[in-house]
DNA sequence: CTCCAGGCAATTG
DNA sequence: CAATTGCATGGA
């Protein structure tokens, strides 16, 4: 088997076998990770940095992911163990959407079934917080640009030698780096939105102080409502963003964020009339209760993310994730 | 030009 | 309570 990074003798090669077919391309761009970068010269590989470890990944076919890593461990775990958890590989995607769904909504099911390969990942909490704080009322393209600019301006560069020359990757900024950022300078990365920049800085300080970081550690064992309250105490984080952070950054697959797209499919696919009204907190919570009746409670958010991508691509005909 | 993008917070009726 | 507005920008 040929390896792309032949000249880079500092990378470790790892193969992760899964008991399911994992669509890595779909996973990497499934929507919640905006600073995944495709390495253009080698279109089969995707890159990401997690805690100063550079990872190059590709789907190597039948039930296997090929990984080139710049370290043997991440966060004290082997790459294998870390990524198994990162890609939530213990989740059987066939069981995420309740079995009754197929009979109750056959025409929707026909569209949604292929999207069971979309996985919800367990990403770094701080990274997810910043990313979704950038995701208010603007398009995906601008969201990605903001995160990319923040990463390149405040993140640590890592240089990798490849056979086509040096490649520079940027790790996501630490809480400390953003906590000490100047609001006016950070605003250059946040669409010139100074309010957003200030909110991110304040959140980073809360995280850095340990207060928010500790709450994240404990977030798996407490009521979802408690997690939301903790997150919503920060300016710039409302119910929707809090649910996104819980779902994508804290492994709370029961969190069901409702955005403009979810709002649309709740009406179009399931005929929930309240989905036509504006998303006040009261209506937001009502719609979540209705969604849980259809998708179940424990994996409502995971299932919702499959529906989210299906709606955007199959119905709204959007090209990219 | 208008409208809408993976919203939130403050204000007004 | 619910409805409206400012925040900002870019693509369709």
Image (tube, coloured by chain):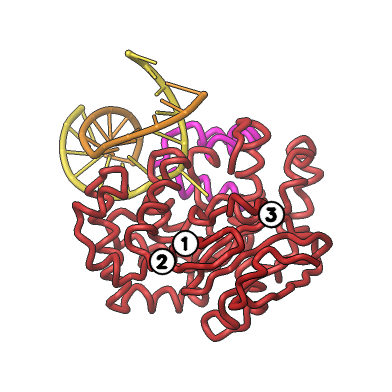
Chain colours: A red, B yellow, C orange
How packed mark 2 is, by other alpha carbons closer than 10 Å (few <14, some 14-19, many 20 or more), is some
Mark 3 residue element: loop
Q: Position of residue A195 (x, y in %)?
A: 23, 49
Q: Which part of the image, by quadrant, shows the N terminus of chain A? A: bottom right
> For mark 3, what is the residue?
A44
Instruction: Identify the residue at image location x=54%, y=54%.
Output: A37
Foreground residue among A75 and A133: A75
Q: Which residues are magenta?
A: A263-292
> For mark 2, what is the residue?
A157
Instruction: Identify the residue at image location x=60%, y=69%.
Output: A86
Mark 2 residue element: strand
Comes first in the chain, label 2 or label 1? 2
Find out whether residue A289 is within the magenta segment.
yes
Find out whether residue A268 is within the magenta segment.
yes
Task: Kindly identify which chain the residue marked by label 3 belongs to.
Answer: A
The relative height of residue A160 versus residue A270 in the rendered view (above or below) is below
How packed mark 3 is, by other alpha carbons closer than 10 Å (few <14, some 14-19, many 20 or more), is some
């Amino acid at each position: 088997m040929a390896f792309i990074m032949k000249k880079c003798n500092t990378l470790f090669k790892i193969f992760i076998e899964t008991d399911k077919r994992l669509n890595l391309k779909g996973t990497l761009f499934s929507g919640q990770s905006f600073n995944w970068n495709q390495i253009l010269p080698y279109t089969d590989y995707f890159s990401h940095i997690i805690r100063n470890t550079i990872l190059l990944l590709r789907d190597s076919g039948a039930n296997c992911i090929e990984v080139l890593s710049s370290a043997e461990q991440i966060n004290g775990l082997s790459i294998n163990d870390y990524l198994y958890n990162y890609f939530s590989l213990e989740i059987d995607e066939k069981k995420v959407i309740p079995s009754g769904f197929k009979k109750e909504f056959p025409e929707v099911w026909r569209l949604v079934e292929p999207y069971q390969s979309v996985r919800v990942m367990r990403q770094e909490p701080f990274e997810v917080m910043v990313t979704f704080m950038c995701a208010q009322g603007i398009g995906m393209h601008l969201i990605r640009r903001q995160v990319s600019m923040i990463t390149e301006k405040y993140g640590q560069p890592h240089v990798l030698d490849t056979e086509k020359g040096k490649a520079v990757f940027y790790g996501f900024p630490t809480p400390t780096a953003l906590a000490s950022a100047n609001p006016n300078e950070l605003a250059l990365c946040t669409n010139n939105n100074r309010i957003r920049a200030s909110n991110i800085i304040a959140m980073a300080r809360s995280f850095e102080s340990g207060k928010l970081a500790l709450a994240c550690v404990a977030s798996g064992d407490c009521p979802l409502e408690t997690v939301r309250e903790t997150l919503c105490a920060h300016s710039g984080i409302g119910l929707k963003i809090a649910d996104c952070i819980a779902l994508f950054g804290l492994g709370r697959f029961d969190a069901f964020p409702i955005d403009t797209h979810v709002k649309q499919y709740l009406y179009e696919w399931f005929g929930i009339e309240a989905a036509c009204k504006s998303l006040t907190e009261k209506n937001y919570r009502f719609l979540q209760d209705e969604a849980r009746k259809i998708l179940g409670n424990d994996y409502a958010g995971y299932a919702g993310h499959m529906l989210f991508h299906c709606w955007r691509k199959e119905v709204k005909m959007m090209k990219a994730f």
